[in-house]
Amino acid sequence: MRSIIQYTAPLFLLLLLLGCEEEETFTLAEISPVETLYAPEEGRFFDLGAQGSAAFEWQAAKASDNGVVLYDVAFDVEGGDFSNPIYVVASDGRGFENRLTLSFTELNQIATLAGVEAEDQATLQWTVWSSKGINVTKSGLTRSFAVRRPGGFPTPDQLFLTGSATEGGEEIAEARAFTKTGATTYEIYTSLKPGTYRFITRRDDTAESFYIDGVKFRADGETTQTDDEQVYRIRLDFSDGTVSTSTIDKVELWFPPRGEFPFALNYSGNGTWVADDQPFEFKEESWGRDERYKFRFTVTDSDGNTTEEWYGSRNGDNARPDGNTPADFYELVPVTDDYWANSFKFRTEVDMATIDVRIIFNDSVPEYTHVVTVQ
């Protein structure tokens, strides 16, 4: 046993020394620089307000051990030397492909990092870095491309209306909330009187603010309201920075069995219209008593064009509701001006009774809706 130990111990030391020598002589594989940029061509222009994407392509680099090469694409401002690029991103396929696809939304974010203002045009540069492990080789080639940023802004989580012209006045805590109607869109129904107003992203003094400038809205300012007090609908789209305003001139209940508008609803604030103490009677038909109804809004846009907008049920036809009917039955959606289609039906107890009707177009409800109360 002792003789075995005597022979194996020197052999172990020899192997250990050889291993150390191999570690000391280990070298990293050399990576060639990217020698050709294929696309986009020099000076290519991208209008980032459109829907689309840009493809960046280049000739593959090589590793001295014929192994896999990874790629990063670096972006910089015009004239930059890429010592401190504004943005670096791995190529497609988690860095394995000699191609990078960026949506216009992502390019817009890069342009924002470069300090390009909304609606401005600027030139950016790109290049490719190839790597294997910690060994990075930067290509000596660069290309330029031009971008025009859209007029939009990052969409806030919330939006509010405040100012002396508004229902809540200048007290920020009383600012009226907008309703979010899409991924980048908001709207509000509200009255405005002479004064000033602005849109804010939070109910505090540090919130971002916006104001109307024609058909666009812009940052850091306020809008002056000079017209007499009216009810407005204001719609904003943060994807392109556009805004539209319309006045809501009249809201009426349409009762097709008699072909008439038996009453109008008056605006009561906070995106709500009310008609109280209204006597109501269904119409007798050969098959029974008809109780169908929906609503008509008369709307005038900022150019002075007046149109009718109809709101009714998402269903083409409905059964008469009762006390067990779910609340979403009463939700209001835009519908056509068809004489009968998409009408609601009153509950049985409405017939020959006095009712209150309330339309609610604000953020206090999951969807715009209305309430009918029998006195």
Image: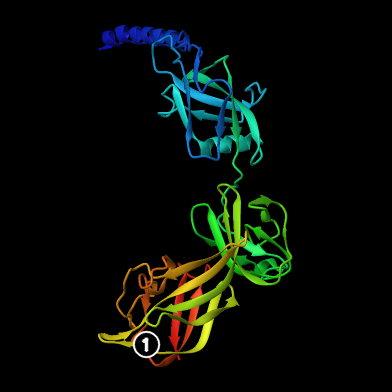
Q: Amino acid at mark 1?
A: Phe
Name the residue rendered at 41%, 23% in the picture: 97
Could you tell me if residue 50 is visible in this image?
yes
Instruction: Give the quarter of the figure containing the C terminus.
Output: bottom left
Count of labels shown?
1
Characterize the local packing of mark 1: few (<14), some (14-19) or many (20 or more) Cα atoms within 10 angstroms: some
Q: Nearer the viewer, residue 34 or 155?
A: 155
From this view, report whether residue 87 is shown above or below residue 264. Answer: above
Q: Tell me which corner region of the image, top left, top right, bottom left or bottom right, holds residue 269.
A: bottom right
From this view, report whether residue 277 is shown above or below residue 86. Answer: below
Instruction: Give the quarter of the figure containing the N terminus.
Output: top left
Q: Position of residue 8 (x, y in %)?
A: 30, 9
Image-based side of 74 in relation to 375, left or right: right
Q: Secondary structure at mark 1?
A: loop
Q: Which residue is mark 1?
A: 282
Q: Position of residue 58 (x, y in %)?
A: 47, 18
Q: Position of residue 159 (x, y in %)?
A: 59, 59
From this view, report whether residue 147 is shown above or below residue 29. Answer: below
Image-based side of 81 in relation to 58, left or right: right
Q: Position of residue 82 (x, y in %)?
A: 62, 23
Q: Nearer the viewer, residue 27 or 167?
A: 167
Which color scheme does this rendered protein use? rainbow
Name the residue rendered at 40%, 7% in the picture: 18
Name the residue rendered at 36%, 89% in the picture: 349
Could you tell me if residue 332 is visible in this image?
no
Q: Nearer the viewer, residue 207 or 332?
A: 332
